[in-house]
Image (cartoon, rainbow, N blue to C red):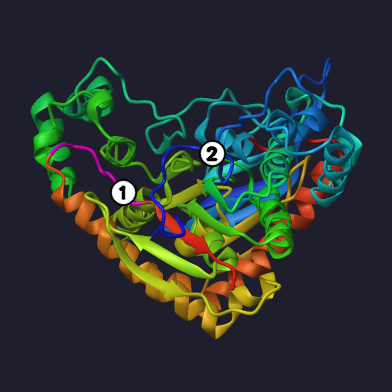
Amino acid sequence: MDGQPVPGPNWERLVVFQETALFPWLTCYENIMFGPLARKVMSKETAHQETLRLLVKVGLEEFRDKYPSQLSGGMQRRAELARALINQPRVMLMDEPFRGLDAMTRKLMQEYYLKLFDETGGTHVFVTSELDEAIILADNLLIMTTKPSKIKKIIDVDLPRPRDWSMASSKKYLGIKAEALELLHEEAARASASSSKVDVDLTGLSGKVETG
Amino acid sequence: MDNATTENGGGRILIDHVEKVYDPEGVNVHALHDCNADIKAGELAMIVGPSGCGKTTLLNAIAGFDNATGGTIHLDGEMIASPDMIQSPGADRMVVFQGGALFPWKTVLSNIIYGPVMQGKMTVDEAVSESRHLMERLGLSRSIEQFYPDSLSSGMKRQVEIIRALVNDPKVLLLDEPFRALDSMTKGLMHEYLLGVFEMTHKTIFFITHDLEEAVFLADRVYVMTTRPGTFRAVIDVDIPRPRDFRVLATEHFAELKEHITSEVEEETMKAFEAGERELA
């Protein structure tokens, strides 16, 4: 990263997982505050202000004192986003963060995420198996091959920001989708043909979102 | 009754003013109300709607697992559900479940032959031969015959489940979110597989899903159910020619249809949320 080898995990590269990683014994508010206080990089007052600001940004200000078990799946995801972003990491790594959410909640999450991305910048690497999600969010689409994995192709998603659902029926969007589908289909077919055991092991799809 | 049969023996489902109330003396859940549909013989019908709206209840009524408390359902002119009938499932209406229902203690082949042999419709030899024939036509390798369900990938399990249903030569294939748990890529392959099955057998298919892209991609018609109590608020024709392949997903017409159906479902989902339905997992 930035020319230096990655030595190990740290706050500069934060992960948002598929399963919730919120501390179940802390409230929403306390979970979000945790990072900067633990690293001693913010005063309590600043952390408090930042937490409130992010709670509003993710629409959870009314739920700040709830525990994770009291939040719905979508709300937990939003709390996770806030908890990561308060640390202002240089890179955000998202591993199918919206998987398992119903279609409408997922769309809502994508909208929140797009707004947060536009405002906070940084480099985001977002793994997903939902092609429409990847295209609507991405600056670049990294399509990976089946095992052993390589990057098969990088597709530039040249759609204007802020993104809008109406773009999903534009010729440009559909052209990107068509190209991606061909490549993915090729890999899916290769994966199922090449497997000698009965496992059909298929690729994930990674959308890389970059600033600048 | 016109259009009652095709060369393959029918499969027209007439759903007429169907009502279903669970536990009328107690919790009194009104699952279906004045539900109507005329699913043609050999139609691939996709059923969508918010969570908890009654889609599975309707499937259960068609399958014969649970009766209707009002109205009737006819299959090729024969009544299969009504309040006065004693419900019974039949091999003419086979179900493929979301969680899968393969016997874990039986091999793939034993699972597939079970139905027709148990019902005395085929001898073991006939059933084995028919199963192998189906597996070959649908591109499943014979080498998996002796495997147990546990050693199959989820995609393959689904393929076996579908063959297991088909070997009974049903008029109707009922599928309740069979591909829900699969990742996107496996799902795509399953769609191709199912369409292959459909082209080959022309069975009527009644398929419940939450995946609207899947719905439009597979459907002849998409039936949109309202929030509880369920009834059909819209039936949308998917006039995309067959055979369809994945390239269809990136066309404008497809995007329009998907958008249309999405807004219908979203409107109903909002009503469901407002009525206090919990969020889907």
Locate residue A162: give its quadrant: bottom right
Say which element carries label 1: loop
Q: Residue B256: in sight, yes or no? A: no
Q: Is residue A201 magenta?
A: yes
Q: Amino acid at mark 1?
A: Leu
For mark 2, name the chain. Answer: A
Query: Closer to the N terminus: mark 2 or mark 1?
Result: 2
Q: Nearer the viewer, mark 2 or mark 1?
A: 2
Residue B53: where, in percent of width, then height?
Answer: 71, 40
Residue that carries the numbered disc 1 in the rendered image = A202
Looking at the magenta stretch, what is its main secondary structure? loop
- The residue range painted magenta reads A197-203
Residue B180: where, in percent of width, then height?
Answer: 48, 42
Q: Residues within 10 Å of mark 2 (few under 14, many from 20)?
A: few
Q: Which image quadrant: the N terminus of chain B? A: bottom right
Have a look at marks 2 and 1 and say if they share a chain. yes
User: Is residue B98 found left or right of B161 in the rendered image?
Assistant: right
